Image: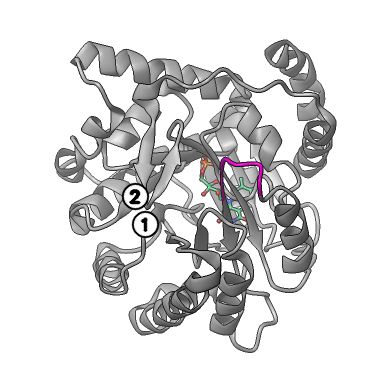
Amino acid sequence: MIGLFERLARPFLHALDAEEAHGLTIRLLTCAPLPRPAADDKRLAVRAFGLNFPNPIGMAAGFDKNADVPDALLRLGFGFVEVGTVTPKPQRGNPRPRVFRLNADQGVINRLGFNSQGAEAVLRRLARRADAGGVVGVNVGANKDAADRVADYVRLIEAFAPVASYVTINVSSPNTPGLRDLQQAAALDDLLARVIDARERVTQQAGPTPVLLKIAPDLSLNQLDDVVGIARSRRVDGMIVGNTTVTRPAGLREVKIAREAGGLSGRPLLPLATRMLAETSVRVESAFVLLGVGGIDSGAAALARIRAGASLIQLYSALIFRGLGLVSEIKAALIAALEREGLDRLTELVGADAASVTAEPWPQ
Ligand SMILES: Cc1cc2nc3c(=O)[nH]c(=O)nc-3n(C[C@H](O)[C@H](O)[C@H](O)COP(=O)(O)O)c2cc1C
């Protein structure tokens, strides 16, 4: 039913401005009577940072920024949902238009700039569903006008720890000026020290809340050395690799739209995101879990990301072009890969190709 509805609705949604189409999709999901999905094949289950994921496919941050529809997304078959980015105070983000589809490239450029209803509104929604189960992480970011950005992250950890399955520290959005500077060694070390300290303080009431770090795919390998070293010494629970890219890979067909400012996602990001995941994996040496994001648009791409080192994956842009059927398509492809290789668990494939991917020529 969902598949049929989607096939009929997609041309209509694509005729709308990208952000309007997104708003309409959220409204539809808010009221759609979705049945509980069939249980996932046990071989797809993943245990990571103390949480049980029924399957490794997550909805990436940015789709459900204000936690309007996490349960609808879980019912559509996602193994977990990351809501946000949430900022402490509400803020509008950049002027519209600020989301652009690159249809011929199956890519998206956005410069939303953390449009958020703010922590209070999101907290209220998550508190209402606190007993509903399922893995729902919260991605947090600083307000654009924050005098002390680190204090914003600390406040958000304290606020969301009681209701979030995990919290992601987003220092990689290209659309808040200066935010990505928090990935520089001294700044990142201070940020993570204070964030982990805040997590320890609230653990007594909230229980242990895993803290993940989401990085940009545009870091140099020297910067990545520093980031991984600091993340290891500060004992984060995982890293998400990564956010949108400010680069414009060679060969984009939508030349005019590609000149729009903002972060690029979707298929053109796939080679860089896979490579950065593998580079991260060989540096992390299984000290913590990696989540692979960026351009995953097929079962083969999902499998390649897992083999490059991801225990879990997330998607967003491909859903715009391929629809929600992609989630079950990826699950079927992963099961087929396990059967082909005679394995019982997906986790056995994690990182199998990390080293060989890092030996390939750098993606253009
Ligand atoms: C419209 C849009 C909004 C996004 N907003 C956020 C956000 O608020 N926070 C965040 O961490 N990532 C955000 N992202 C990045 C995605 O979570 C993801 O890292 C990136 O798009 C790469 O995955 P994809 O190629 O599957 O889309 C956004 C992406 C898009 C396309």
Query: What predominant SS class does the magenta segment belong to?
Result: loop
Report whether 148 appears left or right of 252.
Answer: right
Q: Residue placed farthest to the front in the image? A: 204
Q: Is residue 53 left or right of residue 349?
A: right
Q: Which residues are magenta?
A: 131-136
- Numbered circle sitting on residue 238: 1
Crowding at dot 2, Cα within 10 Å, few <14 / some 14-19 / many 20+, comes out as many
Disc 1 to disc 2: CB gap under 8 Å: yes
Picture quadrant where residue 308 is located:
top left
Q: Which quadrant of the view contains residue 55?
A: top left
Question: Residue 356 magenta-drawn?
Answer: no
Between residue 111 and residue 160, name the one nearer to us. Answer: 160
Q: Residue at x 72, y 67 (%)?
A: 119
Task: Relative to 326, say whether 278 is above or below.
Answer: below
How was the colour assigned to the protein in this rendering?
Answer: one colour
Residue underneath mark 2? 290
Residue 29: horizontal and vertical position, in percent? Answer: 77, 33
Residue type beneath disc 1 = Gly
Q: Distance between the Cα atoms at labels 1 and 2? A: 6 Å
Residue positioned 61% across, 65% down in the render:
160
Earlier-in-chain disc, 1 versus 2: 1
| Callout 2 secondary element | strand
Which image quarter is the N terminus in? top right
